[in-house]
Image (spheres, helix red, strand yellow):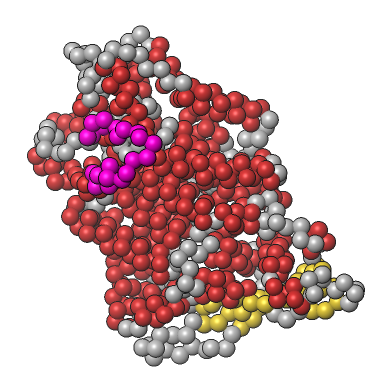
Amino acid sequence: MNRLSLAVSGAIARVTEAALGPYQTAVVRIGFSATWLLFLLRELPHRHELYGPDGPWSFDLAQQLVGSNGSFTVLMWSDGRVWFEIVYALAVLSSALLMLGWRTRTMSVLFMVGVLSLQNRSVFMGDGGDNVLHLMSIYLVFTRCAQVWSLDAGRAARERAVRARGERVTDRTGPVLWGVLGLVLVAVTLAGRMQGDGLIPALLWTVWVVLGVWWLVGRRARTREPRIMLDVVANIVHNGALLVIMAEACLIYATAGWYKIQGSRWQDGTAVYYPLHLECFSPWPGLADLLSASGTMVMLVTYGTVLVQVAFPFTLFNRRVKNVLLAVMMTEHAVIAVVLGLPFFSLAMIAADAVFLPTGFLRRLGDRAARARDRLPRRGGRAPVPGQRAHESPETTP
Amino acid sequence: MDAYDEGSNARHGPDAPSRPTPPTRQDVPVDRPGEPRTGIAALSLRYQVGVALALAVVAIGVCVHLGMTFLHVAPANTVTRAHGDAVDDWIYPEFEQNWKLFAPNPLQQNISIQVRAGVRGPDGMTSVTGWYDLSAEDGRAIDGNLLPSHTQQNELRRAWDFYVATHDGENRPVGLRGALSESYLRRIMVLRLHDDDAVRAATGGAGVIERVQVRSRTSNVPPPEWSREKVSMTPSYRELPWWRVPQDEAEGGMR
């Protein structure tokens, strides 16, 4: 009994005292925002056909479907072409800024709005990669994903240095951003545009209110307690979301694996041959023929795929086996990106896998990236962020 | 992930300091020294109750969400038969997901969507074009392409899946979605025909598309050379009725 209560209090201490997995959540943030950014840039010439008001899935058709399922999309607020271009541009901008980690909580919300708006506008354009992005864009809003590798972390470090000198830090950008977005929220709500399912509008309002409270408490609270409590609650929410992200990745693999077991082609070891020979998934027919030249090889890959997908969630209990399988799965996705012509699906899956990467590996990766960046000739004469590890300090924003 | 890093450290007990600690606020020089460190220990009972409440809400929220998501992706079962509506209420619209990737069996047929059009020329004469294989065009566009577009890879394929899923064998639409899928497919056809140089050549560039007809050509992927399987190589066709194209669409109202 005593050991149980010790374990429980230990667990509570862990999930309250820190936002766990700072490197993992940062790499997930960078991975998904980069995937969406690259996708949006790739589809720039096709954006009207995919999501525009006059595309084949016309505004009118989308309105009927959205009206029946209540999904969230700001693109239904107007059928104007200018509005569409604004939304697309904001989606690009917010994903770039989320990747850099600038005002990360706000950007994660705008990123989610961009992803949901475009995807829900034209649901029949997406594939599995879009589906992963859709879910993760919502989950990311709940995480403190800019503790490392972000502009916010750098800013927090500088602010701490200023405070340590006994000076005051005044932030103008934050309140302005908050005020503008608040005006938009109020206007949109009063105009009655927040129709359909209430989940996303409620989330938008909640984040906005919390950010306001956070700022107020940081400036006005007479004791430190309210601030500490907000910090602890933010940690709890982050850790919950991190668990959901990890469980979601496991569910993806488990579902993909267990349903495959039931298929005759996965049983007789020929399954992998078929997608390689479908017109829409074979950008390199010669390569596909080469890969499927040997029946034994195809069978090994077929069985291996099922094995890895089914086994992955269970390997989480063993660090070493987990890392081996993770490497295998990331490699397989990299191969799928080229061979089946699914680059953005693969990138999204690799980003989801990255939540399981070991901290040591990620830190080495970060150091190497930082060194590569420092070796670059600097333009504009901006001095590097002071302090070797300055970029690793935790953020002090929500 | 810390949750795993624990794996190698857990046996040292909860106080083991060996774990490379992630940056937490403790590492940071505190504003004023001598103050209690952050964490629930620093809070009075009132605030601790608040934290406990938040912890409970998040824990319950996470458990319910994961449970609902699990039931959503799991096959139909005893629980979903009894509480399917509750699961759907939770999942739709934003948490819908489908991970049956190439499962239970990968698609083993190439489904080509083909279209022909009834065109009225500038002289008022009407004519019918030959069949255009749009899927083959997409296939060629994807060949050697490191970054295939969703317009080449998903648009036609998923529009056809949508049509098939919302129509019966006699091509009668089922519900609102059936009607939507018909308009969608028709609009894709007109858009593609407008883009097609061959069509423009056939109509002298001035023709108006009055009606379109869609058909699908389904052919088995030839079995691998090393297998002794034999499948029929004769394609099968599903021909949809002619659809009249509304005037505003026909005049290139799209894009």
Q: Residue drawn at (40%, 11%), measured in percent from left and top?
A: A220
Residue B153 location, x and y as percent?
Answer: 54, 66
Taking the magenta stretch, the answer to whether it contains residue A120 is no
Residue at 43% x, 61% y is: A343
Left or right for B173, reference B43 = right
Q: In the rendered view, does A1 fall on the left or right side of A278?
A: left
Over which residues does the magenta segment extend?
A: A366-390
Q: Residue furthest right?
A: B124
Q: Quadrant of residue A322?
A: bottom left
- Which quadrant would the N terminus of chain A be assigned to in this image? top left
Residue A182 visible at all: yes
| Residue B139 sits in quarter | bottom right
The quadrant holding residue B161 is bottom right
Q: Residue furthest left?
A: B12
Residue A81 % position (x, y): 69, 46
Q: Magenta stretch containing residue A389, yes or no?
A: yes
Left of A145 or right of it: where is A322? left
Residue A335 image point, x, y percent: 36, 66
The percent position of residue A63, horizontal first and vertical second, equals 68, 48
- Foreground pick, A313 / B235: B235
Q: Residue at x 23, y 19 (%)?
A: B30
Residue at 35% across / 78% down in the picture? A291
In the image, residue A341 sits, relative to residue A132, either above or below, namely below
